[in-house]
Image (spheres, helix red, strand yellow):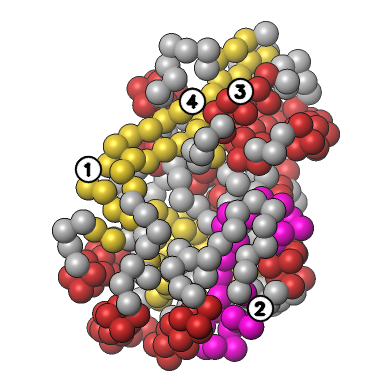
Amino acid sequence: MAVIGSFGVHLCVVPVSEPRGPSSGWYDTRESVLVRLADADGVTGWGEAGLRPGVVDAARELAATLLGADPRRAGALLDRLTRTTADQWAVSAIAVALDDLRARQLGISVADLYGGRRRDTVRAYASTAGYHATREPEELWPAEAAEARAAGFGAIKFRTGGYPAERELPILAGIRSAYGADLEMMVDGNGAYSVPQAFRVARALGELGFTWLEEPVNRFRGSQRYPGYRGLDASLGVAIAGGEGLERRTDFARLLDDGIDIVQPDVGICGGIGEAAFVAELAALRGRACVPHAWGGAILLAATLQLLAVTPEPTEVEGSYGGLLEWDVFENPMRTDLLAEPLAVRDGRVAIPAGPGLGIDVDESAVRALDRLAGSAGDTVR
């Protein structure tokens, strides 16, 4: 099997036409950091992470250490990278690219690297972009619900907490009344609530039949523990979800010990597909669900689909939570323009690509067109 002979790191940043955002801020751009690893025979693997300070440089430095390495030794390579850096986002992008590369070399899907697929398609929920500069939630949220149903989605997640609960809860109640059981509904507070407020909102959402309340309280990133989650659980009538920013399996274990109902690892943050699969197993051992966080481009989505292919059910009933994909419905060229055949939602479901690796074909000309680093030292060959 050929060793790693070259790599590339690409920073894709695209302004959005209309800024949107959750309770905690605004999105003026969409960003993706892409990592490409290629062997001496030209077989290529891709990974993706989000953008934060230092991740591009860290990804370049770490990828350079893999030149001449055997992709089959991915476990040892990732152990070394994790000991080398504190930047788990960069490690995560490289981990996904390594999985894509070694699976393609073997002629199998990434899911086959992790025990084989449990499912071939997954349900998708529409993950909305949050608040709008000129549209009030009284008009915006019902319109988004209608758009999601028209697009075939059977589930939608709203972002709340930007206004008092006294204003927002009646809007959600009206949408629930309009659609009944035909539309599954979730809420993401993005850390907007104090603990007492979170209890109140959770009880109200439980009465309305919402599936989960996500990240209701202040979130610490990295190795820091999420505060305020003890006692905030499904006993309030709605499942509590969180963990998208956690980077280590030990942090997820503590979060589960604190009683969270749904863990949400992100393959571009927690260390890659293998680490996220480990977290899913940890959750299933406790009868808890794993619904991955996936706010990014097509490569991250494809990696999340490979994860969902192998994610265990938390119960003995198939389809309870084991195959549920977050589908970002906000504009993002890295989701829509980078693949020769874009991923798509059909009748509320997404097919898990069955080809080698991640099962997708990245259009490298499209990557170059979006790459802010094009023409720099982004590509290195040995």
- Mark 3 Cα shell of 10 Å, populated few (<14), some (14-19), many (≥20): many
Residue at the spot of label 4:
10
Q: CA distance from mark 4 to mark 3?
A: 10 Å
Q: Tag 2 or tag 1, which sits nearer the N-term?
A: 1
Q: Residue at x 40, y 76 (%)?
A: 184
Residue at (37%, 54%) from the top-left corner? 25
Return the x and y of residue 227 as percentages of the image width and height: 62, 69
With respect to residue 175, does 67 lie above or below? above
Q: Amino acid at mark 2?
A: Arg
State the mark number for residue 17.
1
Q: Which residue is mark 3?
A: 60
- Mark 1 touches mark 2? (CB < 8 Å): no
Residue at (35, 80) in percent of width and height:
165
Q: In what element is the residue under mark 3?
A: helix
Q: CA distance from mark 1 to mark 2?
A: 40 Å
Residue at 66% of width from left, 78% of height from top?
A: 230
Residues shaded magenta: 229-252
Work out how far the residue at label 3 is from the one at label 2, CA to CA, in angstroms.
Answer: 39 Å
Question: What numbered label is drawn on residue 230?
Answer: 2
- Asked whether residue 254 appears in the rendered view, the answer is yes
